[in-house]
Image (cartoon, grey):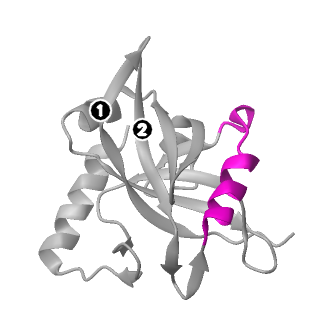
Amino acid sequence: MKLVKFNHTGELVDSFSEEGNDLVKDAELFYTGNHRGRNYTVKDLHALASSFNKEDEIPIQLDHSESARDTVGFLESVSVIGDKLYGKLRIVEDSIKERVRKGLAKKVSISFYTDSSGNPTRLREVSLVAFPQLKGATLFSELDTNEDDLEMYQQYKRSLRV
């Protein structure tokens, strides 16, 4: 099986709940449509949902970091509703919980593995991101960034370091 990282952007849902000391939040992770030249179907969403195993502890990362120090939580569950893939995120890092509560961290981006034909096979990670690489409902395009946006992004990233 060939593993390929794919990034896509969704959003956290406005409501959330507290469970113990953790913040639990629903998020729209992915949706059907033509993304980066490939058409993703409900079947693809179901492949991602059915391969999910809570015991794998899919991490919630900051900005697609590869470092364990940037893990701020774990994906609790995944489901398909209509043409969208949803996930329940458990955020355990105190500083990030506060940013989510205040609405300062509300964009998510996922990575998933694919087989050699490009079909999604399983989720790799979910990241909280300030300025997603990709935007738009059906057409992916690189986000235009001016110098002010880049500086704001750098400040945001520095503020998230724990």
Instruction: Please tell me the numbered disc located at residue 15.
Output: 1
**Residue that protrudes farthest toward the left in the picture:** 148
Q: How many marks?
A: 2
- Boundaries of the magenta span: 41-57
Instruction: Report x, y in % for residue 10.
Output: 40, 58
SS at mark 2 in the image: strand
- Res 69 seen here: yes
> For residue 119, which numbered disc appears in the image?
none
Give above or below for 95 relative to 35: above
C-alpha distance separating marks 2 and 1: 8 Å
Q: At label 1, which amino acid type do we have? A: Ser
Q: Relative to 91, say whether 67 is above or below.
A: below
- The residue type indicated by label 2 comes to Asp
Quadrant containing the C terminus in the rendered view: top left
User: Which of the 4 quarters of the picture holds residue 20?
Assistant: top left
Circle 1 Cα neighbour tier, 10 Å, few/some/many (<14 / 14–19 / ≥20): few
Residue, disc 2: 26
Residue 72 visible in image: no
Magenta stretch: includes residue 53: yes
Task: Give the crowd class for mark 2: few <14, some 14-19, many >=20 residues within 10 Å.
Answer: many
Asked if labels 1 and 2 touch by Cβ distance under 8 angstroms, the answer is: yes
Place of residue 100 in the rendered image (x, y in percent of width and height, measured from the top left): 28, 37
- Residue that appears at 40% across and 82% down: 139
